[in-house]
Amino acid sequence: MKKLTLLFLTLSLFNFAVQANDNDPNPPLKDKVLTLAKQVEAKVIEWRHWVHENAELSNREFKTAEFVANHLKSLGIEVQTGVAHTGVVGTLVGGKPGPVIGLRADMDGLPVKERVNIPWASKQIGEYQGEEVPVMHACGHDTHVAILMGVAEVLSQVKDDLEGTVKFVFQPAEEGVPPGEEGGAKMMVEEGVTDGMDVMFGLHINSKTEVGRVRYRKEGIMAAVNSFNLKIKGVQSHGAYPWASVDPIVTASQIIMNSQVVVSRNLNLTKAAAVLTFGKIDGGVRSNIIPEEVNMEGTIRTLDLGMQQRLFKRFRSIVENTAKANGAEAVLTINEGYPITYNDPDLVALMDDTFMEVAGAENVENAIDAVTGAEDFSFFQEKVPGLYFFIGGMPKGMDPADSAPHHTPDFYVDDEGLLTGIRLMSRMVVDYAEKSK
């Protein structure tokens, strides 16, 4: 009887404690930001729709930057505009000492014509490489902007209890700067955005990951990327007399085929993935003229620096020797690109619990395979420890095979995925400040 009485008293005290916590007028900061995130969700969705409908190309995010800056100023956050051309950086100084934490959102859209049937579809027109093109947020950057605006509102409401300083980094030109221009994360770093920063967090929504789910890994999560330009110089001739030519079209086709062995036969793919893709070929003006020149463009993706250098060397050797064998001349330029997006292992370990607590352990994958997509968030990570992760944007219950991939006209992510981003980014600030003491 005494044991039953003791059990009853224990349960009663536990229930009282739970009820008291639920009704706590001053909950712990880590719980308070989650509540505030839910309260701001509806506004974040509205902001997302506005940014989506007003999509702008890289280094041309004028309306988006103004929209963001006005919001940050309304929250009493110190705002710097014109960073790396159109970037916006907001600085929120907490009421207590602590680390300087960076949170990043990219702002640019793509030259893609939207086919998604939504009321807030983009009908914007921009200029890309001298041509008039439709503009669409075909990669989800509209959600990133809205999420970070929401996080700024959440954290500004708990400013007095916040430990440290938060820098809200709204970055232009993640998709690549226009030819002849500078910009993006690299330029932001050069202009001092990461100076004094202790750590930086970034996210990307994903159209093939269900809403509510979170995916990340330690170390390399996204590939380094390098574009290349290849010019094949031959000798022009009438198409009826090919023996009088040095045919750059035939040479180009041989180079394309010969280069396929670089990845499949020269790299240890059990160590890391690599990609060598030709994306553009341009040569000739009509059917009966063998042209003097062919120009090609493509992309290289690597997840290991040693493999990257071997790929460069073998690719260049094949290009030059194939051209030489045909009597042609090849000029290969491998352009500077983005480094590997590298998640600091210690930072990942420190934040694992935050992902689990906020999203639920059943919704977290923390050892995903690296992907051959690329991100210029990597430039920030070269300066400060960084953590980059993916959140779900695919409607619940949908088959990933039926969800359009990024950078396509049918790309779509559900508004329901935004709350996970707001909650995670807000909690990361609070938790990192506490855990890094």
Image (cartoon, grey):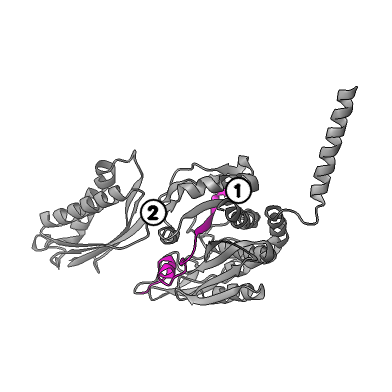
Nearest the eye: 58 or 410: 58
- In the rendered image, which quarter is residue 187 located in? bottom left
Q: Residue at x 65, y 63 (%)?
A: 155
What residue would you read off at disc 1? 354
Question: Of helix, strand and loop, which one carries label 1?
Answer: helix
Q: Amino acid at mark 2?
A: Ile
- In the rendered image, which quarter is residue 286 located in? bottom left
Q: Residue furthest top?
A: 1
User: Is residue 298 a member of the stretch shown in magenta?
Assistant: no
Check the picture and name the quadrant holding the N terminus.
top right
What residue would you read off at disc 2? 340
Q: Is residue 336 visible?
A: yes
Q: Residue at x 17, y 53 (%)?
A: 317
Q: Which mark is residue 42?
A: none
User: Is residue 200 a member of the stretch shown in magenta?
Assistant: yes
Q: Position of residue 3 (x, y in %)?
A: 86, 24
Disc 2 to disc 1, how far (Cα)? 24 Å
